Image (cartoon, rainbow, N blue to C red):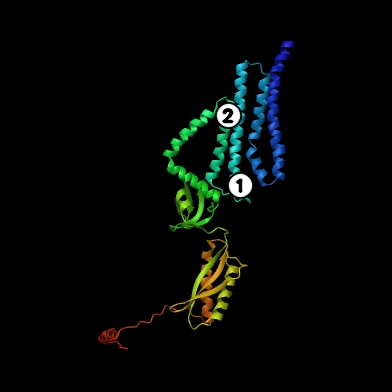
Amino acid sequence: MRFDLDRTLAVALPTALVLAGLLLGVLVQRLLLRRGTAEAGSARVLIVGTLRGPVVLWGAILGLYLALEFVALPARTARLLQQTVLLLIILSATWSLARLAAAYVTHASRGATRLPSASLLVNVARLLVLAIGLLVILGTLGVSITPLLTALGVGGLAVGLALQDTLVNFFAGIHILTSRQVRPGDYVKLESGEEGYVADITWRYTTIRQLSNNVTIVPNAKLASAITTNYYLPETELAVLVQVGVSYGSDLARVEEVTTAVAREVLRDVPGAVPTFEPFIRYHTFGESSVNFTVILRGREFVARYLIIHEFIKRLHARYRREDITIPFPIRTLDLAPDAVRSLRDVARAAGRPAE
């Protein structure tokens, strides 16, 4: 009877420890994490969402690790099993932390920190955590890390020389993201003429989606050294300039009053305009056939300017007609030599047309 009881305890206790660890993981998941999701802010919700699955696995592995202490196994086998379980814990924790780091980089881009979200930073954060986890695993296995780091340094130098262009683009991408002068989602225009939304910044290329729905792929090194206009910095709102000309016989004060009234109407009615902005005009040139001026309106972002200009030109043209304000055609006065005038008259007579 004594023998059976000992044998029963030898089986029941490890089993109970495994089940206890599993139940502990489920309890933490359902009580603490769910409560955190309901009560905490978005940052904690992010952590909860990342750790919701692994916490049950960690509880089960912890119970298994403790159960091995009470199982009658050869010392070498028990030590090997415990080391294997410990490695599983480290691997799962490393993978979860890598996911959390990648999710945080994505989340931070939408918060007050305005950290740019791009696949380059996401992958760098994930790989950095995985590399640290690998070093911890090697240390747990008793592998000396110092010779490995030395070998990696020498090998990394050789690889760096072979992949020089790739590394230049990689570090250029890091520079672009950390400087925050070009961010995913910004509308930019390159000095070569390409423009569009920055779709993504990867380890080698920056992808720009044009308004025509085409994609321009720019190496990071070229983007970092190019003269680039970012229409989203320092803010997305921008001035919308429209060039207009009226005849020399116009009452310029009346022209300013009518044009400003139309501009106010456009800013109030057109989506993408800034209705609180007070539009104004500035005369700047006595042209060949008109007095030219610039109308200054304001849009919420670069793309909104197309609809604003479209509606403004339509409404201004109709209003000028009602107000009898003339937008003149180009007029040129030609000064011809007397011989040229006589030749033109001879041609006109030969054609049977008046020679005046």
Task: Locate the N terminus by quadrant.
Answer: top right
How crowded is the residue under tag 2: few (<14 C-alpha within 10 Å), some, or many (20+)? some
x then y, percent, for residue 128: 56, 38
x then y, percent, for residue 257: 58, 78
Name the residue tied to disc 2. Answer: 137
Q: Quadrant of residue 22?
A: top right
Does residue 68 appear anywhere in the picture? yes
Q: Which residue is depicted at the point 49% across and 47% down?
A: 172
x then y, percent, for residue 134: 56, 32
What label does residue 107 carry, if any? 1
On screen, residue 211 versus residue 343, left or right, reads right
- Which of the marked residues, 2 or 1, is nearer the chain's N terminus? 1
**Total count of labels:** 2
How crowded is the residue under tag 1: few (<14 C-alpha within 10 Å), some, or many (20+)? some
- As helix, strand or loop, the secondary structure at mark 2 comes to helix
Does residue 202 appear anywhere in the picture? no
Q: Which residue is depicted at the point 53% across and 66% down?
A: 240
